[in-house]
Image (tube, rainbow, N blue to C red):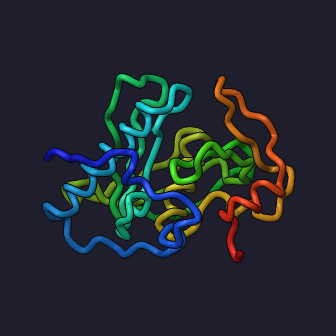
Amino acid sequence: MKSNYTRKNIIALPDPQLRRKSARVRTIDAKILQLIDNMIAAALDWEDSRPHEVAVALAAVQIGALERVIIIRKNFDDKENKKFLVLINPEIIKKEGKITLDSEGCLSVKNLYGQVPRHEKVRVRGLDITGREIRLKSPDPFIARILQHEIDHCNGICFVDHIADQQDAFSILREDGELEPYPYEKVVKMGILPDE
């Protein structure tokens, strides 16, 4: 299927839809397959506009569809490899390992990054596009982080919600691709933190 979706279809905070829970997919039909194509098209168009970033993943809610669907890039190091793993109705079965802090960004939060605590390992299950169950054991902390981030989106949680009261947790992406600390007062003024 073709898609005319672009980065303009990606919604951003403070859009309230990003804090709504997505519904379980009951049937993997043409509508869901089109949704997946739309997600991939929007993510890749976003990436084409960002010289220092790769579109590593996207949840359906980020293009305004309240369906429990996520896509994750199969190869984060090769921008030419545009293949994505699709997980429908993903859920975390188990969180394991230490909780570590690392930098996280989001296609729905422009240029802002945060030091977010996440488990180093997760076990996840979901369905592929044929409806077959997939079980994943995250091979490294980076993929575990991505899975937790995207499944959070399905539950109406954004990465900034985890660190909303951490005044020194935020950074901004400069034009040269480097991160620099970003004042908490400016984050508050953006109107993206919960319960505002």
Residue 75, horizontal then vertical, whole percent: 42, 30
Residue 63 drawn above or below residue 43: below
Residue 129 drawn above or below residue 7: below
Residue 66, horizontal then vertical, whole percent: 37, 70
Residue 35, horizontal then vertical, whole percent: 26, 57
Q: Image point 56% across, 49% down: which residue?
A: 106
Q: Image point 59% across, 40% down: which residue?
A: 142
- In the image, 45 versus 94, the foreground residue is 45
- Left or right placement of residue 179 versus residue 77 in this view: right
Q: Image point 31% across, 35% down: which residue?
A: 83
Residue 134 drawn above or below residue 195: above
User: The C terminus appears in which quarter of the rendering?
Assistant: bottom right
- In the image, 4 versus 156, the foreground residue is 4
Question: How many marks overall?
Answer: 0
- The answer to which image quadrant residue 63 occupies is bottom left
- The answer to which image quadrant residue 188 occupies is bottom right
Q: Image point 39% across, 43% down: which residue?
A: 43
- Left or right placement of residue 24 versus residue 108 in this view: left
